[in-house]
Amino acid sequence: MQIKHLKLRNWRNFHLVDVDLGARVILIGPNASGKSNFLDVFRFLRDIAGEGLQKAVRVNRGGIGVLRCLSARQYSNIDIEIAIDDESDQWNYRLVINQDNNSRPMVKEEVVSRNGIVVEKRPNKEDGLDPERLFYTSLEQVVANHQFRKLSEFFRSVSYQNLLPQVVRDPKGFTANPVADDPFGRDFLMRMWRTQERTRDSRLKKIGQALRVAVPQLTKLEVAMDDVGSPHLVVGYEHWRRVDAKQYERDLSDGTLRLLGLLWSLFEGEGPLLLEEPEISLHSEVVSRLPQMIERINRSRRIKRQVFISTHSEDLLGDKGIAADEVLRLEPGKDGTKVLAADATEREMVKHGLSVAEVILPKSAPKDIAQLALAF
């Protein structure tokens, strides 16, 4: 399944969004333009499907007031509409939400269609008889989503990865309680350990081959459990002695851990993968090859994943394999951030040999950036 189109109204930075999406989507834009907030709409749908509307809005994001775009005027609802291609089926999901007088998130409209035929439309007759039902989406309810459970499962398969090396090194220092599917890495090593051994070893062998290019002294890479039940990375390093030295996650550089986490995330899961600034802490030569690495791993999978990448990196965007129509440029303004696809001129320039870094990236720089140094 692949997300083909997205419409938003009053979502965070965005007053209005209406864009097509491909198998790989690369977001560029100045700081605070909304790249993270754009990605968050997919995490939001994942949270609704897995945890419910109330937790997705109130607990995970602080309420409707936080989600609603500041540019919203007479129309205060938040609208999300998403089109999904499932080979033979075309799905469309529309959700409109607001809040009641007690600030509880509620469904104003929810519509699911399959191949143009509506299979769920709310508010419905039952909602009229019991308005409390509108505090729950049909997407999150097993008894209500039986006709489109595949859609709910797809949203739950969305994966967001933004591994923080400090968290991987000391997960208990950030939380005493176990955490599942943490994008920042609190359960990263445990997820690796719990992966079926044959699969884990196969992935680590491939990842180790890639890491040896960036870290030439590396000889082996594995995961082991200590005596108190905590998993650890065990890395072998060549040095002047005959026996390799052992190092653990606490000894690895930020760049090594981030690259390892990025590569592991490409093998893990089947749904859309959201990557936020994967270039952080990596050498520019490694960054320049990330698009090729991501594409090659994706092609080797049984099910190719849709990948969303936010970035500021000229090195990453310098890859000539990135097409102009894979890039969305975010442009902030007084009426919210616009999401702009490449125009005909930009597509033609990239088609004739220029890179996205040369053609589109310069347009994403903050206005009046030349005045930055003069501010002091």
Image (spheres, rainbow, N blue to C red):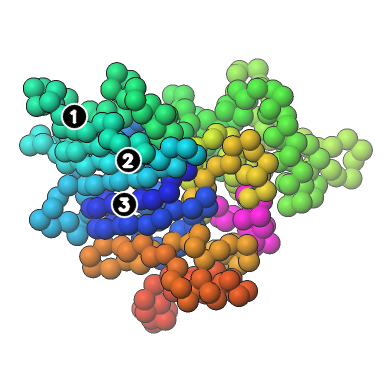
- Nearest to N terminus: mark 3 or mark 2: 3
Q: Secondary structure at mark 1?
A: helix
Residue tagged 1: 135
Q: Nearer the viewer, residue 107 or 183?
A: 107
Label annotation for residue 7:
3
Q: Residue at x 39, y 72 (%)?
A: 366
Give the number of the mark in front: 2 or 1.
Answer: 2
Residue 29 lies in the magenta-colored region: no
Q: Residue at x 41, y 35 (%)?
A: 155
Q: Residue at x 72, y 29 (%)?
A: 201
Amino acid beneath label 3: Lys
Side (left or right) of 226 relative to 38: right
Give the number of the mark in front: 3 or 2.
Answer: 2
Q: Secondary structure at mark 2?
A: loop
Residue 291 lies in the magenta-colored region: yes
> Residue 266's spot in the image, x, y percent?
60, 41
> Residue 235's spot in the image, x, y percent?
74, 36
Q: Are marks 3 and 1 in contact (CB under 8 Å)?
A: no
Amino acid beneath label 1: Phe
> Residue 300's spot in the image, x, y percent?
68, 41
- Extent of the magenta region: 278-294
Q: CA distance from mark 3 to mark 2?
A: 17 Å
Q: Nearer the viewer, residue 294 or 229?
A: 294
- Nearest to N terminus: mark 2 or mark 1: 2
Quarter holding the C terminus? bottom left
